[in-house]
Amino acid sequence: MRFKSWNAGVLVFAMAAASPALAQVNVETDQDRAVVEVERMPVQVGVNFGVNNFTGAAGDLTGTGALLGVNASVQPWRLIGVELGYEGSRNPVDGTQGGLWRHNVGALAKVGPTLGQNQNIHPFVGAGVGLSYINPSGDAEDSFRTDYVSEVPLALGVETQLGPVNAGVRATYRILGADNFTPDPDANSNLFNASLMLGGRF
């Protein structure tokens, strides 16, 4: 079955994000006034929107595309956060009326300090894993093929907390494990995207 809209991916992710929040255990030594407590970690949910470009063989045949995504993240440690997300995008295929749709689910570990007078600025670097379903539409089906592709995202960004609102910007380079969706299965392609994020903490 082919997905040619954002709806299927967003629906699946929204159901997953509705699961109970994680908990963390903080344990301090006697020297640090031993306290053992279980507390609910706040969950940060955001919507991403931006642009992306394929590199290599896929980039030679496609133009700049738009992306839309949603993610949920928690901060189980002071310097390390974990993010789960869905991202959908469409890149136009040169010389056709069709496009190359991509639906991705993935996980990202984010590492970085908290800065600022209110400790509300969070620059980070991140790395993770993901899986994409790539599906050509229209005339693009004549040259591209439907395929599942593994990804290794490498991200650099900054986020800030403004009261209940969270905002951020990031750039991500995604290393594709295979690109059998292109006309030349022996060629190499990767993906670069840049996006803004707007969300809240619950």
Image (cartoon, rainbow, N blue to C red):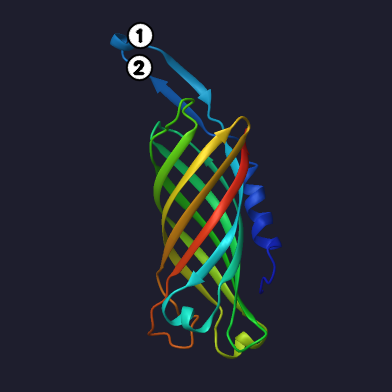
Mark 2 vs mark 1, CA separation in Å: 7 Å
Residue 112 is situated, as x and y percent measured from the top left of the image, at 38, 39
Q: Are marks 2 and 1 in contact (CB under 8 Å)?
A: yes
Residue 171 is situated, as x and y percent measured from the top left of the image, at 46, 56
Query: Horizontal placement of 195 versus 109: left or right?
Result: right
Q: Using the rendered view, name the quadrant where residue 146 is placed.
A: bottom right
In the depicted structure, whether residue 23 falls above or below residue 64: above
Q: What amino acid is labelled 1 in the image?
A: Arg
In the depicted structure, whether residue 55 falls above or below residue 155: below
Say few, some or many: other residues with alpha carbon within 10 Å of mark 1 (under 14 / 14 to 19 / 20 or more): few
Q: Quadrant of the C terminus?
A: top right
At 40% from the left edge and 31% from the top edge, which residue is drawn?
Answer: 78
Q: Nearer the viewer, residue 7 or 47?
A: 47
Residue 186 is situated, as x and y percent measured from the top left of the image, at 38, 85
Query: Horizontal placement of 188 versus 167: left or right?
Result: left
At 40% from the left edge and 70% from the top edge, which residue is drawn?
Answer: 177
Q: What amino acid is labelled 2 in the image?
A: Glu
In the depicted structure, whether residue 50 falls above or below residue 16: below
Query: Horizontal placement of 174 versus 13: left or right?
Result: left
Q: What label sits on residue 33 in the rendered view? A: 1
SS at badge 1: loop
Say few, some or many: other residues with alpha carbon within 10 Å of mark 2 (under 14 / 14 to 19 / 20 or more): few
Q: Nearer the viewer, residue 66 or 134?
A: 66
SS at badge 2: loop
Q: Which residue is mark 2?
A: 28
Residue 53 is situated, as x and y percent measured from the top left of the image, at 50, 70
Which of pointers 2 and 1 lies earlier in the amino acid sequence?
A: 2
Furthest-left residue in view? 31
In the depicted structure, whether residue 125 falls above or below residue 33: below
